[in-house]
Amino acid sequence: MESLKIKVTVANRTYPLTIKREDEEQVRKAVKVIDERLKVYEKSFAARDTQDLLSMCLLEMSVKLLTDEQKVKVDSSVEEQLQMLESLIDEQL
């Protein structure tokens, strides 16, 4: 795994990062998503403090992550049940 040193800017602050080369695209996409959400919050809310905007962005993304994780758990459970049903059907045939 080859590492790569990059600089990213979030909320007008630059951060040097050392990442895996294969993660670069995802990191840059994440920075873009964060910046886009910050702009939305900046326009939508009276809060002008960058810390507040970053906190709202973090909260939104965390809720989405937790919701997606819950969906994956449900999907896994459904898949397990389908496999069990398939096994039962196969036994009867």
Image: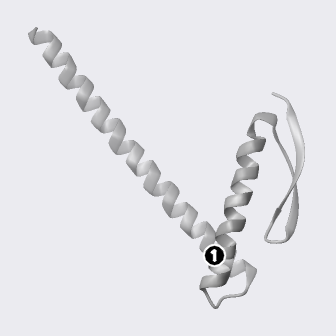
Q: Name the residue rendered at 60%, 75% in the picture.
A: 56
**View extreme (top): residue:** 93
In the picture, which quadrant includes the N terminus?
Answer: top right
Horizontal side of residue 62 vs 38, given as left or right: left
- 86 up-or-down from 79: above or below: above
- 60 up-or-down from 90: above or below: below
Q: Position of residue 78 (x, y in %)?
A: 28, 37
Per the image, the residue denoted by label 1 is 40
Q: Position of residue 7 (x, y in %)?
A: 89, 54
Q: Name the residue rendered at 74%, 58% in the picture.
A: 31
Instruction: Specify the quadrant of the image occupied by residue 55.
Output: bottom right
> Could you tell me which secondary element the residue under label 1 belongs to?
helix
Total residue callouts: 1
Q: Name the residue rendered at 50%, 59% in the picture.
A: 64
Horizontal side of residue 12 vs 51, given as left or right: right
**View extreme (left): residue:** 92
- 55 up-or-down from 4: above or below: below
Q: Name the residue rendered at 15%, 18% in the picture.
A: 88
Instruction: Specify the quadrant of the image occupied by residue 85.
Output: top left
Instruction: Specify the quadrant of the image occupied by residue 62.
Output: bottom right
In the picture, which quadrant includes the C terminus?
Answer: top left
Q: Position of residue 4 (x, y in %)?
A: 88, 39
Q: Nearer the viewer, residue 1 or 27?
A: 27
Horizontal side of residue 28 vs 14, given as left or right: left
How would you rate the neighbour count of disc 1 (Cα within 10 Å): few for under 14, some for 14-19, many for 20 or more?
few
Q: How is the image coloured?
A: one colour
- 13 up-or-down from 8: above or below: below
**View extreme (bottom): residue:** 46
Horizontal side of residue 92 vs 77, given as left or right: left
Dot 1 amino acid type? Val
